[in-house]
Image (cartoon, rainbow, N blue to C red):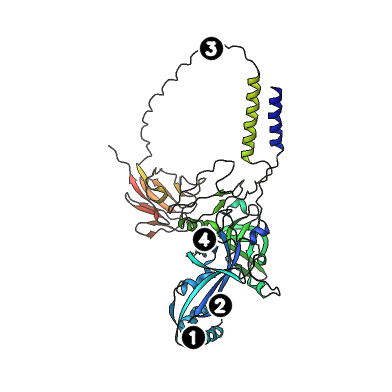
Amino acid sequence: MKRRLFSVILILCLLLSLQITASAEAKPADLRHSVARVVVIQYINGREFPSIGMGTCFFVGENGKNPQFAITNHHVISLFTELGGGKQIEVDYNDWIKLMESHGYDTNSVRQVWNSLANNANKAYINININIFFSQDSYSEAYLVEADAVNDFAILRLAEPTSLRGALPIALPNQDMVGQDCFSVGYPAIADTSALVERWGEKDATINKGNVSRLGTESGSGRPMIQTDAVFHSGNSGGPLVLDANGAAIGITTELRTGGSTAVYYAVGMDIVKPALDRNNIKYTLTTYPVETPKPTPAPTAKPTPAPTAKPTPAPTVEPTPAPAPAPGLPVWAYALIAAVVVAVIALLLRGRKKPNAAPMPATAPAPKPAPAQKSAPRSDDYGYRIQGVSGALEGKRFSVPSGNPVTIGRNPQECGIVLPPDTAGVSSKHCSVWIDKGTVYVMDLSSSHGTFLAPGKRLAANQAVKLQEGDIVWLGSEAQSFVLAKKRVN
């Protein structure tokens, strides 16, 4: 008995002294290994006009597997979509000049290019390729999966997974990240003019450190933006903004805005890109902050549902790079394991002691069955109005409409009485509210990003109460998320 007890205690001491590594801080080698140079190349009558679009991309996918998909900015590859999307098209000289001018090209320079490649003709055949360069001498053609001009992102696909780069995990921005260290990673164009011989290789990616300054929503577009002081320049566009604490991409470096001698840098949040990855069944590794371990995600269905709360397991299906806990100490599963060992020690101690025969316990009387619930009398303030889901996350669900105090509808469970999943596209954290006043039902848009509508498409003014009639259908952002005002039927 003593020997067995000693062995168990020894194991317990080893567990308590074990240093469990939960660090997944961003490492320069990992950051550089995830990015590549994107170059859009135009062919006029089969002759190359190189570098009409240039930026950075970063790869996403499952940890430990060669990635096939990359993310960049839409504006990096926008000429590809405007000039045929990879198909050969016939273009008029004047139209081409105007298009190139709108993208910032010098008029005289592009005229000279046209005259040289199109032999002064009024029309020419044009086609465009997107290439991802792993070095200045090694590249693969990429194909457009999805592009979003408003939110300024694009998803690219290689014909086959590549072993030349690795995937970054992604994380959705939240207020806990504000003030945390971050990195911008990419290939600024100004670096290409340096005296260094090699360009666009893995070790040539530029890394700049800064902080997450704040999170916000851009006026007009409604896209979530991350403000940072991590410096980036032209050519960095499309590269990742990586949180140092967990090594995950939280945004796509998009633009810098200057005022006098100061500059502010912005990235598009990954929460705007994740639904597109889900729509296209692209696998990725999702982590959160604060976090103990990243959560690998399976290929989502076309209509994704919010992921269930992850149960602690010894190892996930796809082994993600561990991320740091917000404070020093052991992970939760380690404490659970230690607690289990402690329970085992106590059990062994109790089993080692002989107990006197105890008198049999009297049989326990069965618990009385609860009386059937009495139907409560209808409340005097219940007018019988119900919100009944028509489409989207609310489909098939019913909620009573209160009298007096409004019920708020949105994605924030702390502030909303009717809560939609956190990744519901087009729905704000506090989208709209519904209430009854003296028997009349009202709805009010709460300055939502994508608007509240009365079917078949009348947008409501923000913060103005609008009467609802039984049978009116309300859209949250679009008809994909909608409910109807119904009335409880009395038998």
Which mark lies nearer to you, 1 or 4?
1
Q: Residue beneath label 4, please?
A: 223
Label 4 vs label 2, nearer the camera: 2
* Residue 73 location (% of width, % of height): 54, 66
Quick one: label 4, few (<14), some, or many (20+) residues within 10 Å? Answer: some
Q: What element carries label 2?
A: strand
Q: Which of the two discs, 1 and 4, labels the residue nearer the N terminus?
A: 1
Vertical order, 338 against 302 (above or below): above
**Marks 1 and 2, how far apart in space?**
15 Å
Give the residue furthest to the bottom: 120
Q: Vertical placement of 45 versus 358: above or below?
A: below
Amino acid type shown at disc 1: Ala
**Residue at the far left in the pictured view:** 491
Q: Is residue 236 left or right of residue 299?
A: right
Mark 3 residue element: loop
- Mark 4–mark 2 Cα distance, whole angstroms, equals 32 Å
Residue indicated by mark 1: 118
User: Can residue 263 be spotted in the picture?
Assistant: yes
Q: Which of marks 4 and 3 is nearer the N terminus?
A: 4
Q: Earlier in the sequence, mark 3 or mark 2?
A: 2
Q: Which of 366 and 134 is in front in this view?
A: 134
Q: Mark 2 points at which residue?
A: 50
Q: Residue at x 65, y 48 (%)?
A: 324
Q: Do the residues labelled 1 and 4 touch (CB within 8 Å)?
A: no
